[in-house]
Amino acid sequence: PLENVVQEVERLLDSPTASAPFNTLFEAGDKVTIVISDITRLVRLHEYLPPVVNRLNSLGIPDEDIIILVATGTHRGQTPEEHKTIVGEEIYSRIKVVDHDCDNSEMVNVGTTSRGTEVVVNSLVVERKVILTGGIVHHLMAGFGGGRKSIIPGVASRETIAQNHLHSLDPEKEQSNPLIGVGAIKDNPLHEDMVEGAGLVNPDFLINSIIHTDGRIAKLVAGHWLKAWEEGCQWADDNYGVPISKQADLVIAS
């Protein structure tokens, strides 16, 4: 696990992956939305969010010009206590935290993906500069969590989420699409549609965590919303995946 999370965040802000340094992306006068995961995905945000907010402050962006948007997808809203648990008491006392509502939030249509998904998202990620946070973990359908999932399904309309999630089904048979699955990114239509949709928003920066088996932060990645996330996915595969030399007729996993 990382011994000094704040120090690592500061290093990543100055030397991000496939991105200009953080200090050149944000400046006084900017309105910033920080997208965070909801209570179902505890990624120890309270440890790595404060240095990001403090860096924004140091660039002349006060707390009142920052909004924290909870990427609930189609999940329920969070209680004030859950908000406090996710972001930490200090940040909760300083920054406005709002839940995305896939049915009632003010939405903007930013375009349509090549697979026909109409990308309608929360206006807070269209009208302001956007920082994505979250966690990278193997995911049953999308290959990995984190990254582009903060946009779709995170802050998208219910209709957009439904259109995107249909790609988890086989278009020909009554079964799951064989191209989706744990760790599957290449040719995964669900993932690729999410990436294309997130690209229409084109967030300004990303910082994602990977959690150690003991619950602490094992790794942080930061930088370009797609490239830095992909770096984290590779790290997660290398460190938490099990190499198998060939396909088997049956695999029993525990």
Image (cartoon, rainbow, N blue to C red):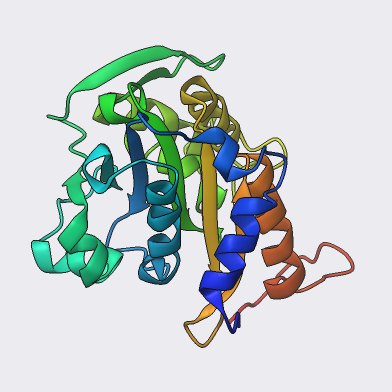
Give coordinates of residue 18: x percent, y percent: 72, 40
Q: How many marks?
A: 0
Please indicate whether residue 239 sits to the left or right of residue 34 in the image. Answer: right
Which of the two residues, 241 or 84, is positioned nearer the viewer here?
84
Q: Note whether 29 is above or below 111 in the view shown.
A: below
Please indicate whether residue 178 sits to the left or right of residue 146 in the image. Answer: right
Residue 53: image quadrant is bottom left
Q: Which corner quadrant holds the N terminus?
A: bottom right
Give coordinates of residue 26: x percent, y percent: 48, 35
Tell me which residue sits at (29%, 17%) in the image: 108
Which of the two residues, 35 or 107, is positioned nearer the viewer here?
35
Residue 30: image quadrant is top left
Q: Note whether 5 is above or below 101 in the view shown.
A: below
Which of the two residues, 88 or 41, is positioned nearer the viewer here?
88
Q: Note whether 172 is above or below 72 in the view shown.
A: above
Give coordinates of residue 117: x percent, y percent: 44, 19
Which of the two residues, 164 or 111, is positioned nearer the viewer here?
111
Tell me which residue sits at (65%, 41%) in the image: 179
Question: Farthest residue in the bottom direction?
Answer: 214
Please indicate whether residue 1 sits to the left or right of residue 49 in the image. Answer: right
Tell me which residue sits at (42%, 43%) in the image: 150
Q: Which corner quadrant holds the C terminus?
A: bottom right
Can the viewer see residue 225? no
Residue 114: image quadrant is top right
Tell me which residue sits at (50%, 52%) in the image: 146
Give coordinates of residue 203: x percent, y percent: 49, 32
Can the viewer see residue 125? yes
